[in-house]
Image: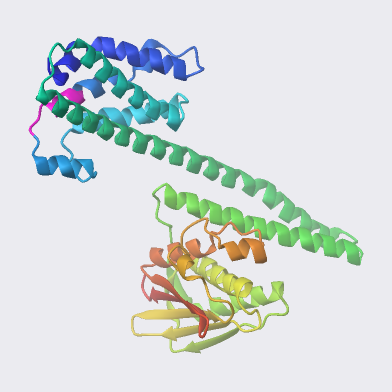
Amino acid sequence: MRLSEFMVAEVERIVSEWEQFARVLTADEDLDRDTLRDHARAILLAAARNMNTAQTAREQVAKAKGEGPEQTPSLNRAASSHGELRHHIGFDLVQMTSEFRHLRACVIHLWVGSLKTPDLNYFQDMIRFNEAIDEALAESTAAYAEQVNHSRDLFLAILGHDLRAPLQAVSMSTEMLLRKGNLDADGLTYVAHIKQGARHMGAMVGDLLELVRSRLGKRLPIDPAPMDLAIAARVALAEASAGQPDCRPTLSVHGDATGHWDRGRIDQLLQNLIGNALQHGNRRIVTVQLSGMATEVVLTVHNPGEPIPVDAIATIFDPLVRSSSESLNNPSTSLGLGLFIVKEVAQAHGGTVEVKSTAEQGTTFTVVLPRNS
């Protein structure tokens, strides 16, 4: 009997083996029979149909490389649903993938034991069966991983949202102490430290929520209105200087720097770019330049100092990325989201951001913002 025929004829026996193995994997004794079997029957029958379809030698080679056409949508749907449900009932990724390993071994073992005489076609059957199982495993793993990522992002969203209330309470309490408290010099210093720490934590929470929003598939929301980028840059530089009295950043403006942008988002972009330059470059030499063009405004932030490593350039705008030199030589409370937020803000306005960094010329971030977003 050909393998595809054997799988259809013995599907109940094979699914029972799947159920028994799944029960061994999980410590949850309350899982019922249907839950343990899940999409096993659908996966097996779809795999059998896949094995009965014609396949050229070229298609077989392409499929082995993961480049073949999607020929079995029913197999993919069943496998994807299986990955999602296994995540929901508490299976980890190793447990789920081991189910497919056991399924493969079980089917081949039972089929080989049923054979009376060998046939050359049987080897081709085994190849086709392995291809189908690999396809199902890939779909299940992808669906499982997507569920893990979604659950993590929801947790981070809830965490970031819930942290806002206690942070606001801390900030309001420090304001009340400064207004009503009769504090000595030491007390004022302590309150200033608390206020600064709460502000930093608030910025980190805001960055975290922006990351989660982007991962959940939501474009950064903006509300463009007429504004002057030069004024916003001066305010951002003043705030940066207040926190670091030894720094002397400079601003130069060439041409018209007005346009339609979201003021709050632009403030985020400026604060992160300037803060990044102050943190990683020479604090006394940070230059911000605005150049008004016909349809866009170009913002550059330049600082001398150690260049960005070549291998870090490609991922510098990715979320949660911090260089090894930062973590060892210049530790901070940064989550590695500042430049990611810069990229998101620029793209939300239809603009771009890029970086160039050499030992001779220093590091320059360039943001191009269309005047009418």
Nearer the observer, 65 or 250: 65
Residue lying at 39% horizontally and 26% vertically, measured from the top left:
98
Instruction: Name above or below for residue 151 compared with residue 240.
Output: above
Instruction: Determine the residue located farthest toward the front in the rendered image.
Output: 117
Residue 72: give x, y in percent of width and height: 18, 33
Which residue is nearer to you in this view: 337 or 186? Answer: 337
Q: For the point 52% across and 65% down, which residue is it?
A: 264
Task: Residue 286: name its quadrant.
Answer: bottom right
> Does residue 175 appear in the picture of this structure?
no
Number of callouts in the render? 0
Let me know if residue 34 is in the magenta part: no
Could you tell me if residue 218 is visible in this image? yes
Residue beneath the point at 22% across and 41% down: 64
User: Residue 249: x and y, percent?
Assistant: 62, 82
Q: For the magenta stretch, what is the residue range?
A: 46-54
* Quarter placement of the C terminus: bottom left
The quadrant the N terminus occupies is top left
Q: Residue at x 63, y 80 (%)?
A: 282
Quarter-of-image position of residue 198: bottom right
Q: Left or right? Give the position of 302 relative to 166.
A: left
Taking 221 as reference, is 328 left or right? right
> Magenta part mainly helix, strand or loop?
helix
Q: Nearer the viewer, residue 276 or 242?
A: 276
Look at the picture and state if 319 lies above or below 122: below
Side (left or right) of 194 relative to 98 = right
| 9 relative to 371, above or below | above
- In x, y percent, where is residue 169? 71, 50
User: How was the colour assigned to the protein in this rendering?
Assistant: rainbow
Q: Quadrant of residue 295?
A: bottom left
